[in-house]
Amino acid sequence: MWRRVAIGVVLAGVLAGCGGDPGGGLPKTVVAKVGTTTYRSGKLHTGDTVVCKGEGGQVGAAVPKTGHGVAGSGFIVVEHHQDGSVVVECHPPPSGTTGGFG
């Protein structure tokens, strides 16, 4: 009996988001503004996707682990700072080029 109760408590904690990313929930996709944008801590989390759209298409990148950065096709740069903030540089593809995805 106690084993079932313990399993139920652990399962309830997992379903409530305990022990995961502080942001919890499923990864989300955010469309960045052209230029440089800083998202405050807690707004974006590791695994979320940032998309940069332009007339030539769109490129995107996943938010990397804290303390890391990633670049995509020279059109997008995503940096996840130690304080939890995420800085995105979005320079969408010009017309007549093909973007990363979409």
Image: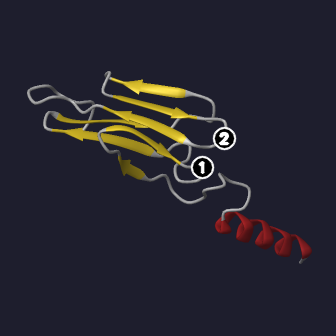
Residue assigned mark 1: 41
> Residue 17: percent from the left, percent from the top?
66, 63
Q: What SS does tag 1 mark?
A: loop
Splitting the image into 4 quarters, where does residue 55 fall? Answer: top left
In the image, residue 98 above or below residue 53: above
Q: Nearer the viewer, residue 70 or 88?
A: 88
The numbered dot on residue 83 is 2
Determine the residue located farthest toward the top in the rendered image: 74
The amino acid marked with disc number 1 is Ser
Residue closest to the eye, 20 or 93: 93
| 100 shown above or below 43 | above
Q: Is residue 35 left or right of residue 88?
A: left
Q: Position of residue 8 (x, y in %)?
A: 77, 73
* Rendered residue at 91%/75% (across/down): 2
Q: Earlier in the sequence, mark 2 or mark 1?
A: 1
Residue 6 badge: none
